[in-house]
Image (spheres, helix red, strand yellow):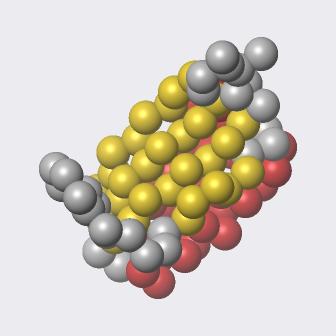
Amino acid sequence: MAKGYWIGHVDVDDMDTYKQYIAANAAPFAEFGGRFLVRGGQHQVREGSSRQRTVVIEFDSYDTALACYESTGYQTAKALRDPVSISDLVVIEGYDG
């Protein structure tokens, strides 16, 4: 079964408040088995454009990745993030070749 991934690109306007989101999302990510593969870090944009932060989170399946996003726990955390950031988020099924 192919894994599922969240790929997020985020611009943060208030890092202190954003840290509250980071603390709040730990429980739903643990509940759904989310594992950070990329969480900010140094990067270079070689084509197109990007935001300040890139995040990649791996889940055991695409369905689990979707369920985490739709969960009450994550939506509660997201409500902390929304006022202080602009985000692009894709939930995508991994390649199981």
Name above or below for residue 15 compared with residue 47.
below
* Residue 84 in view in this figure: no
Residue shown at the point (60%, 22%) measured from the top left: 95
* Residue 24 in view in this figure: yes
Name above or below for residue 39 compared with residue 96.
below
Residue 22 percent across, percent down from the top left? 60, 67
Residue shown at the point (66%, 17%) measured from the top left: 97
Residue 11 percent across, percent down from the top left? 30, 65
Q: Nearer the viewer, residue 26 or 47?
A: 47
Q: Nearer the viewer, residue 61 or 70?
A: 61
Residue 75 image-quadrant placement: top right
In this picture, residue 5 sits left or right of residue 52: right
Residue shown at the point (81%, 50%) measured from the top left: 30
Name above or below for residue 53 compared with residue 55.
below
Task: Specify the quadrant that holds the N terminus.
Answer: top right
Q: Nearer the viewer, residue 83 or 47?
A: 47
